[in-house]
Amino acid sequence: MVDTPTLLVMKFGGTNMQGAAAIRHSASLVARSLNAEVRVVVVVSAMSGVTNLLLGVAEAGEKGDIAGANDMIAALRTRHFTAAQELGAAPDSATVRELRELLETLRQAVYGVYLLRELTARSRDLIVAFGERLSAPLMSLALEASGHRPHHLTGGQAGIVTDAHFGSARPLSSTAGRIRDRLGGLLDAGLTPVIAGFMGETEKGATTTLGRGGTDYSATIVGAALHASEVWAWKDVDGVMSADPRAVQGAQNIAQLSYGEVMELAYFGAKVLHPLAVTPLQDAGIPLRVKSAADPDFPGTLVTASPDTDSAHPVKAVTAIRGVSIINVSGAGFLGVPDVVADLFAALARENITLLMVSQSSSMSNVSLAILSSDEERTLEALGRPMGGRPMQLDVQREVAVLAIVGAGMRGTKGVSAKLFGALAGDDINILMISQGSSELNISVAIEGRDVDGATRTVHTAFGLDAAVVAS
Ligand code: ASP
Ligand code: MG
C-alpha cells in the first residue's frame, strides 16, 4: 500500500466535466493539491446530460428506433471528440482511438437491444455506464496536459465488485481489498488513477451501476478502501445548501453536517449527494467535503461524525421531493392483522420500492404509503394481490410532495414540530401525512405538490435559515 502521508479522493460531477474548459478546470483542482506529499485518486461522472442521453439511446433501441439511437450516438461522438481535440488529442492519438472503440462497442450493444427489442436492467447498465467510460479518458488528457501521469480505469478495473442488482448495485465485501490491490501499485508508481464513477462489475464481469448520482458513492467506496484522509466531492454549488436555491432565494451553504444528517438530506430530495454516499466513510470516520469548483478556496460543507452544532438552529435544512403519490391501503378485516402488514411490506421489498413515508391509522384499519410517482405502477401491481389472504382496496392521491426538515439538533429540542406546523398553517397549507423518525433527525410532511415551493420558503424562514449563519 501507499506510504504517503496524505491521500485525497476527488470526485467530479457532470457539470465539472461538461466540456473541455470545465474538464481543464477540474484537472487544475487536482493539480493544486497534488505534490510529493499528497496523492490524489480522481473519480469522474459522465459529461453533463450524457447519462440521460444514454438512457434515451437504450430506449430508442428497445422501441426499434435504431436511426434515432444512432443519431444520439453520433451526437455523443461529436461531443467527446470535440472535447478530446480541445484538450490537445491528435486525431490518431491513443485517446481518440480509445473513444472510437468505446463508441463502437456502445453502438453494437444498442444494436443488440434493437434486434431483441428487449432492454433488460442488465443491458441498460452496460449502456449507461459508457458515459463515465468516455469521460475518464478526457480527464486523463487534461491531467497529462498539466504535466501529471494519469491512468484511467473503469469502475470494475479499479476493483469495485458489486452484487447483480442492476441499476442499484451495492459493493461486495471483497471490494476494499480489490481496490487496494488494483490502485496501490499505480499510486506507488506515482500515477494518478482516474476512475469512471457510477459503475462497478459483478464477480462474473457484467457491468453494473450504483444508481443515479452514483459517482459520489464510487468515490467514497474508493476512499474508504484506501483509508483516504478525505474525500472531496467537487460540485457546481457552494456545498450542501439549506434549501434548493432555485426555490429559496435565501438558501445558503451549511458549513458542517453529520453523516446521518447528510443521508437524511439526500434521502429527502436534496440532489447534492447519493443517499448512500457517506455509508462507506462512517466506520472509518473519513471526512467528506462538498466543494464548489467555481470557488475552490471556499470551504464548502464538511461532513463528519460529530460536527459542531449551533443550538440556535436545530434545523439545518429544508428539502422537498416532488412527484410523490400517496397510496392508501385499506380492506375489510385489515384491522390489526399482522399477516396483512407483513405481506404488504414484503411485497414492497420484493419490488424494491422506496418508501418515503408510512403512516398507519391508530385503529389499524388502513396504511398510507408515500412513494415516488414513478414507482406508482409497480406499487399498485405489487399490492394488487390479496394481503394476509384478504383483498385490499387501494386509493391513490397524486401530485403530492414530501417536505422534510433535517437537523440533529432537533433531538430533544422542544417546539420544532409546533413551529413547522404553525408555519404551514399560517400559509394555509394542508398536511396530508406526518412522520418523525425516532432518531429525530427529520420531520417530514406530505403536502399538495402545488404548495411545495411556497411551503419550502415559509419553513426555511420560520427556522431562521435565511441569511443567518448556519451552524459553523
Ligand atoms: N452520471 C451518473 C448520473 O448522472 C452518475 C453521476 O453523475 O454521479 O446519474
Ligand atoms: Mg450526473
Image (spheres, grey):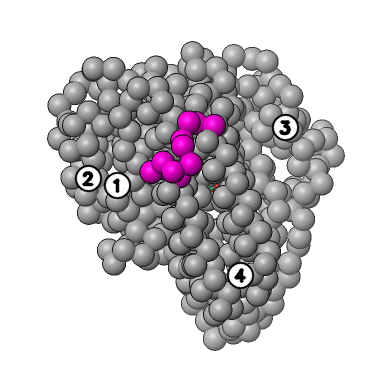
Mark 2 residue element: helix
State whether residue 266 appears in this view. no
- Between label 4 and label 3, give the one nearer the viewer: 4
Which residue is disc 4 drawn over?
61
Q: Residue 215 carries which label?
A: none
Q: Which mark is residue 158?
A: 1
Which residue is disc 3 drawn over?
246
CA gap, disc 3 and disc 2: 41 Å
Amino acid type, label 3: Arg
Q: Which x, y percent locates residue 353?
A: 54, 63
Q: Are marks 4 and 1 in contact (CB under 8 Å)?
A: no
CA gap, disc 4 and disc 2: 35 Å
Which badge, 4 or 2, is on the more N-terminal residue? Answer: 4
Which badge, 4 or 3, is on the more N-terminal residue? Answer: 4
| Residue visible at 42% across and 33% down in the picture | 141
Which badge, 3 or 1, is on the more N-terminal residue? Answer: 1
Mark 3 residue element: loop
- Between label 3 and label 2, give the one nearer the viewer: 2
CA gap, disc 4 and disc 3: 35 Å
Which badge, 3 or 2, is on the more N-terminal residue? Answer: 2
Q: Which mark is residue 182?
A: 2
Residue 334 relative to residue 393: left or right: left
CA gap, disc 4 and disc 1: 30 Å
Return the residue found at the far right: 428
Mark 4 residue element: helix
Vertical side of 269 occupied by 42: above or below: above
